[in-house]
Image: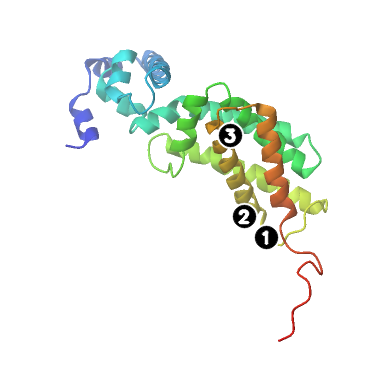
Amino acid sequence: MDIRAQSSALLPEDADAARSAPPGLRERNKAEKLQRIRKAARALFIKRGYDDTTMRDIAKRAGVGFGTLFTYASDKRDLLFLIFNDELDDIVDSAFVRAAKEHVFLDQLVAYYGGFYSFFAPQPELSRVVLREMTLYLKGRQAEQFQASCGRMIGHLASFVAQACAAKQLRTHEEPQLVAQALLSTFASEIRRWIAADDRALKQGLARLRQMLALQVSGLAPRAGALGKRSKA
């Protein structure tokens, strides 16, 4: 039997009480439950680990019915992003503001991505799970918000690419959106490599990221004469 079908048969009495409450009280009750669920999920994911925590464990700790969880999240991965989505939204916004103060393209990129490194650094175990689970995260109640954040990141990076091209810091015939996606892929690979390491010094992590981005920005196209003369047949 599908777990979501089970949940509809297990709607708790507190859901009925919430529906019968006045609108203002109903919204407060819903917000309060959401905070309890977020707090319980974060605590259990940290204490037991994401893979060893069940949705029933989270419902019990939050003091809500099992079915109530499905009002907020479609599955356990959705619950993980229920914790992080709002924070990631804030990081995306602040990253853009910080990077926009820089005038050199590579400095903009490092300033932009640096906020994400700083955010993930204090909670490496949970951060590894988030970075793992965001791969191909397309479906779920919380997925739309996450994908919107990713879209805003692409838009931010594309705007930096366009500005750099206008300032002749970059020379490319590719669309800024495509360049932005390539730059985002480099970041995604590097931050996963960094967070998985035992030594996660922020300064060194950003220095390595800068090297990788510089390599990408400069390109690997050969200069005139770099390949030497063709040998005659």
| Picture coordinates of residue 135, whole percent (x, y) | 46, 42
**Cβ–Cβ under 8 Å for marks 1 and 3:** no
State which quadrant residue 2 falls in: top left
Q: From mark 1 to mark 3, how far is it between C-alphas?
A: 29 Å
Residue at 66% x, 42% y is: 156
Res 96 seen here = no
| Picture coordinates of residue 227, whole percent (x, y) | 75, 69
In the rendered structure, the answer to whether residue 215 lies left or right of residue 184 reads right
**Cβ–Cβ under 8 Å for marks 2 and 3:** no
As helix, strand or loop, the secondary structure at mark 2 comes to helix
State which quadrant residue 38 falls in: top left
Task: Give, as a three-letter code, the residue at label 1.
Answer: Glu
Residue 85 against residue 211 in the figure, above or below: above
Task: Give, as a three-letter code, the residue at label 3.
Answer: Trp
Residue at 70% x, 29% y is: 203
Q: Which mark is residue 178?
A: 2
**Cβ–Cβ under 8 Å for marks 1 and 2:** yes
In the rendered structure, the answer to whether residue 165 lies left or right of residue 113 reads right
| Picture coordinates of residue 118, whole percent (x, y) | 63, 26
Q: Mark 3 sits on what residue?
A: 194
Task: Give, as a three-letter code, the residue at label 2.
Answer: Leu
Q: Quadrant of the N terminus?
A: top left
As helix, strand or loop, the secondary structure at mark 1 comes to loop
Q: Mark 1 sits on what residue?
A: 174
Res 147 seen here = yes
Q: How is the image coloured?
A: rainbow
As helix, strand or loop, the secondary structure at mark 3 comes to helix
Q: From mark 1 to mark 2, how far is it between C-alphas?
A: 7 Å
Residue at 29% x, 19% y is: 57
